[in-house]
Image (cartoon, grey):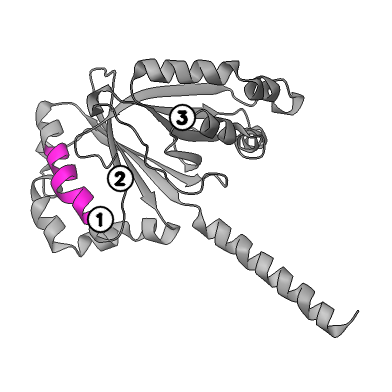
Amino acid sequence: MKLSKLFFLIAIFCTLSSFGKTATKSREFYQIKTYILQSSKQVETTEKFLKEAYLPALKRIGIKNIGVFKPRVTDSLKKIIVLIPFSSMKQFVSLDENLAKDKIYATTGADYINASYKEAPYVRIESILLQAFTDHPLLKTPSLNSPRENRVYELRSYESATEAIYRNKVDMFNAGGEIILFNRLAFNAVFYGEVLSGAKMPNLMYLTTFDNQESRDSHWKAFVDSPEWKGLIAMEKYKNNISHIDITFLYPTDYSDY
C-alpha cells in the first residue's frame, strides 16, 4: 500500500472516530424533578421559589429551555414537574455547587431554602435522570398556538421485562423508525430519553405535545392506523418489548419556557 493512501485511510479513521465522540457528547441529559405537595402553602412557596429563584438561577449558569408542568388530573397530593436539560453530566453534577455560589438565588429563594422542618415546602422530591436518544439528541421546544391551559403534554414511560428487552425497545425508536414516524405525523416531541437512574427500571420516557385533547387523540389515531406502525408491530424481533406503560397528561405553567 502506498504511503499516501495509508495516510488517507488513517485520516478518515481519525475523522470518523472524532465524529463518533462528538455525536456521543452531543446527546443531552435530562432531569425530571417532581415536587410532591400537600398544602396550599407548600404550593405557594414552591412555585414562588421555582419562578423567582430556581429557574432564573439555572439560566444564569447557561441552562435554558426548562419546562414546568402540572398534571391535568390530581389526587390528594399535588405535583409540579420540572424538566431540566443538561449539556453534559458535568453540568448536572456541578449544579448544586454552582447554585450555592449564587447570592441572588440565595436571597430570592430564601423562604424555600431556609424553611424549617416544621414548615417544609414539599412532602418529597422525586428525581429521574435520563440521556437523550441517539436519533433525538437535543431537546426541541414545541410549536403550539393554543392557549397554555388547553395544551396537552403527554409524558410516557415504557418499562421492559429485562435490560436486553429494554434495549430492543430503544432500538425500535431509533433504528426501527418510530421516531421518524412521530416526526412525520407532527407529534411535537420535546425529548426521548433512556432512564439512567429512577424508581422504575429498565425504562424509557418521552414527551409529546399537542394543541388540545382533540388534537392529541387524532394524532394517536393516525399513528396507530399508519402502515409504518403496523409494519413495526408485525416484526417478530419487536414483539413483547414493553411490560408496562404509564401515561401522564400535563399542562405548562405560566412560567414554563414552553
Residue 133 placement: quadrant: top right
Q: CA distance from mark 2 to mark 3?
A: 19 Å
Q: CA distance from mark 2 to mark 1?
A: 9 Å
Residue 209 placement: quadrant: top left
Q: Closer to the camera, 144 or 162? A: 144
What residue would you read off at disc 1? 59
In x, y percent, where is residue 121? 15, 38
Q: Which mark is residue 66?
A: 2
User: Which residue range is magenta in the image?
Assistant: 45-57
Q: Is residue 224 above or below residue 193?
A: above
What residue would you read off at disc 3? 187
Q: Is residue 237 above or below residue 26?
A: above
Element type at mark 3: loop
- Badge 3 crowding class, 10 Å Cα cut-off, few under 14, some 14 to 19, many 20 or more, is many
Q: Closer to the camera, 82 or 225? A: 225
Residue type, label 2? Ile
Q: Residue at x 66, y 20 (%)?
A: 227
